[in-house]
Image (tube, rainbow, N blue to C red):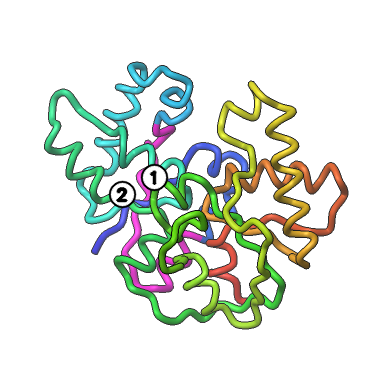
Amino acid sequence: MTVGLFIPCYVNQFYPQAAIATLQLLQKLGVDVVYPPRQTCCGQPMANSGFEHLTQDCNRLFLENFSEFDYIVAPSASCVLHVKQHLHSPDNPALADRTRSNVYELVEFLTDVLKVDQLTARFPHKVGIHQSCHGLRGLYLAQMSELNAAPFSKPVQLLNMVDGLELVDLDRPDECCGFGGTFCVAEEAVSVKMGKDRVTDHMKNGAEYITSVDLSCLMHLEGILHRNRSAVKAVHIAEILNATL
């Protein structure tokens, strides 16, 4: 298979180490990865702000960059969910439909397509998982705690394969961090209070690192950690799954 590596704009600008870890991890697992250099924003910020009609050029460029790959993989649940739900083309709807169905978040791709059952990673630390709303309730990467159903978690499934890693149990395992894209700007006080609650939960239960499938959430939590001068660090799950330290 050939995979098109989709790196969202904020990952490219602020967290290139997560993009590099994603590439290296896929290559370790024998995947032929191609990075289309002309890719840019998928249009999610505009769509979330009520301007989806202005994302036509983003959709067109995404199809030009990614429509010919067997799969498209990205280290961002929110951007993947946006593409899955909103990518369209008035000129070639069939191509847009096919491309939407080939887009995967990294953890989803590793568990559902590659069916990874072992990793060579080592990360000897206590880690708490932040379940992003897009990953949990949009991509169904884990079971929602409010449902009376058998629990499962694709991130946990992979992290349990990492040597030396100890997962910590949280009091509220799938509560929103408060980032919410532009919500953190429009409702700053509410957003910060929600983020502080999530950080407190991880710290209370002994986490040394907070990980997630969404760097937007981690960016929000990382800001709170830095302001509190906390020793707890935020790290994308790709960096842990690719770690050899």
Percent position of residue 206, x then y:
78, 67
Circle 2 SS class: strand
Marks 2,1: beta carbons within 8 A: yes
Would you call the spot at circle 1 few (<14 residues within 10 Å), some (14-19), or many (20 or more)? many
Secondary structure of residue under mark 1 = helix
Label 1 sits on what residue type? Answer: Val
Q: Tell me which residue sits at (54%, 49%) in the image.
A: 132
Does 47 sit left or right of 4 as displayed?
right
Q: Amino acid at mark 2?
A: Val
Per the rendering, the mark at residue 114 is none
Image: 44 above or below 71: above
Q: Any mark on residue 103, and which? A: 2
In front here: 217 or 243? Answer: 217
Q: Residues within 10 Å of mark 2 (few under 14, many from 20)?
A: many
Magenta stretch containing residue 29, yes or no? Answer: yes
Question: Is 20 placed left or right of 65 in the picture?
Answer: right
Calculate the distance from the C-alpha at mark 2 to the C-alpha at mark 1: 7 Å
- The range drawn in magenta is 22-42
Q: Quadrant of residue 26?
A: bottom left
Badge 1 is on which residue? 80
Residue at the right extreme?
A: 229
Q: Quadrant of the N terminus?
A: bottom left
On whether residue 176 falls in the magenta region, the answer is no
Is residue 21 toward the left or the right of residue 37 in the image?
right
In percent of width and height, residue 52 lies at 36, 21
Apparent side of residue 50 relative to residue 17 in the rendered image (left or right): left
Q: Position of residue 13 (x, y in %)?
A: 58, 39
Q: Residue at x 31, y 49 (%)?
A: 103
The reply to whether residue 245 is in sight is no
Position of the C terminus by quadrant: bottom right
